[in-house]
Image (cartoon, grey):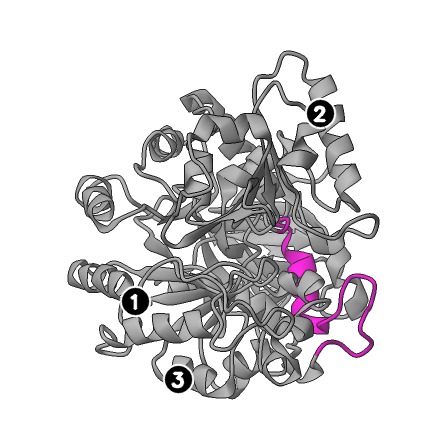
Amino acid sequence: MKKYINGKVYIEKGNFAQAFAVEDGKIKNIGSNEEIKKLPGQEVDLGGKTVLPGLIDSHLHLRTMGETLIQLRLYNSKSIDEVVQRGKDYLKDHEGIQFIYGRGWNQDYFVEGEKRFVNRHDLDKISTEIPIIAERVCVHILSCNTKALEMLGIDENTVIEGGEIYKDENGELLGIFAEKATEILRNIVPEDTKEDIQEKFLAGVNHALVNGLTSVQSCDVFMADHWDPIHGAIEELYMEKKVPLRYYPQFNLTDLDKIKDYVEKIYKRDGIYDETYERGAIKLFKDGTLGARTALMSKPYNDDPSTKGIEAMTNEYVDSICAYADQENIRVVTHCIGDEAAKRVVDSYEKINHENNPNRNGLIHLQITDRPLLERIARLNINVTYQPIFLEYDIMTVRDRVGDELASTSYAHNTLKNVLGAHTAYSTDAPVEDLNPFPCMYSAVTRQRVNGEPEGGLYPNERVSVEDAIDCYTIEGAYTEGNEKIKGRIQPGYLADFIILDRDIFTIDKMDIKDVKVEETFINGESVYKKN
């Protein structure tokens, strides 16, 4: 047994302990220093440090997060020229490379030159000899150069249901693909070997542990025709006990037959799943993103009345998957950002919502909402996975996109959780944003960008407390998995997953929450990361 004393240990809102004991990978006792010191075992002095339960990111793409640490990084580019220059520098530093995949550009961050999507003419300035794909930060828009476009074998008459292929004013292809249309472009990306996949996944795992994540719900089989080789490579790491991070997959396959095949061959197997490696959930996409104006809205966009966004899946198709998942008792989680997308997904869920949503079907993102939609979600006990960190960007655009009235009831972190009583968990959707949870908590608590704007926060009635933000990263994340009785708290009998912080997140200036760092991360009572 190990005894951790002289700390500030978060138990639940308004409740802290000084000390706790760990035995056989679980929390044995909590209490005062005097109470825990009486127990047998090795004593560890926390030196007054703050201790939280291990954090749970309830939706990200861990392998892709690791991949972004290796590939061409276009995040925070200030112009199209900077995107091009980063590509040229990457090509120079990777002599002999035969394919470039870049991630993270966002036209709304461009402050020089044109403020538009990157297109093939831009990427041709990097190279016309090798194919190049550049992914917008939201991952719902892909741009490519002319070489990559030639490899696709499509023309200006090609139509992709549930997607869009952009053209210029003369009807010529721009090398820009949205939603379902991105799948045909992804098909030309060279396949990773098993070793490549594992290298990228482990890079993501290490990054997660450094940032205090002890569990992830990760969508790594993403817009895929088949689960291998990605699933097989990740599973092998877990079967060989090479990964301590708790893993709950969200598998996204392209049609119902492929989902059924996965369920029969992978999901239903016995003898391999445990508290570290779980069965997971079906992941669906109903629409796109607000930044790209592909999120499905009930009314035309305020700043572009020509569009209401894109519906990636029909209602009938979502209904069919939900009916199958209900029959097999499998959880479904669905990406929906626009209010119309959310309403339609809730319609599908309500058809199988017997006994208060026993499979814990959930909504991921739920950015744009009105009050009746929020009330309906709470009444049906549909859980929501929010990404408060998205406010860092969306604070600048949401009013323009949807108007003041709808914006005022959107990103409703406080209303849904504390006023209506729904279950809300937090995540980063990494690598859309970095998986560091503390800037995400900062966004939820302040409703401000990292530069402190706007003063007082965007619709400050939707700010949450520090305790709320931590709960959404711990016990609420565990609830979405059905694991709230074994993790997400420092309580006797719970898994001994916990983190030690470098400062007291409960008393520091709220502006400093984004700068909190993890000094040590524990899973099953074992240290898996320690700051040097």
Look at the image and give the residue range highlighted in magenta. Answer: 433-458
Please give the name of the residue rendered at 32% of the width and 54% of the height, measured from the top-left corner: 282
Tell me where residue 91 sits by quadrant: top right
Of mark 3 and mark 2, the one earlier in the sequence is 2
Mark 2 neighbour class, 10 Å CA radius: few under 14, some 14 to 19, many 20 or more:
some
Compute the Cα span from label 3 to label 2.
Answer: 49 Å
Sequence order check, earlier mark of 2 and 1: 2
Q: Which residue is mark 2?
A: 90
**Is residue 439 one of those drawn in magenta?**
yes
347 relative to 75 in the view: left or right: left
Which is more foreground, mark 3 or mark 2? 2
Q: Which residue is mark 1?
A: 315
Indicate the amino acid at tag 3. Arg
Residue 502 shows up from this direction: no
Give the SS element for disc 3: helix
Instruction: Give x and y (percent) for residue 407.
Output: 62, 79
Report the front residue among 464 and 432: 432
Counting labels gives: 3
Question: SS at mark 2?
Answer: helix
Q: For this view, does 89 lie left or right of residue 36?
A: right
Across and down, in percent, residue 516 comes to 74, 56
Depth order, front residue of 482/386 = 386
Asked whether the beta carbons under mark 3 and mark 2 sit within 8 Å of each other, the answer is no
Q: Residue furthest front?
A: 170
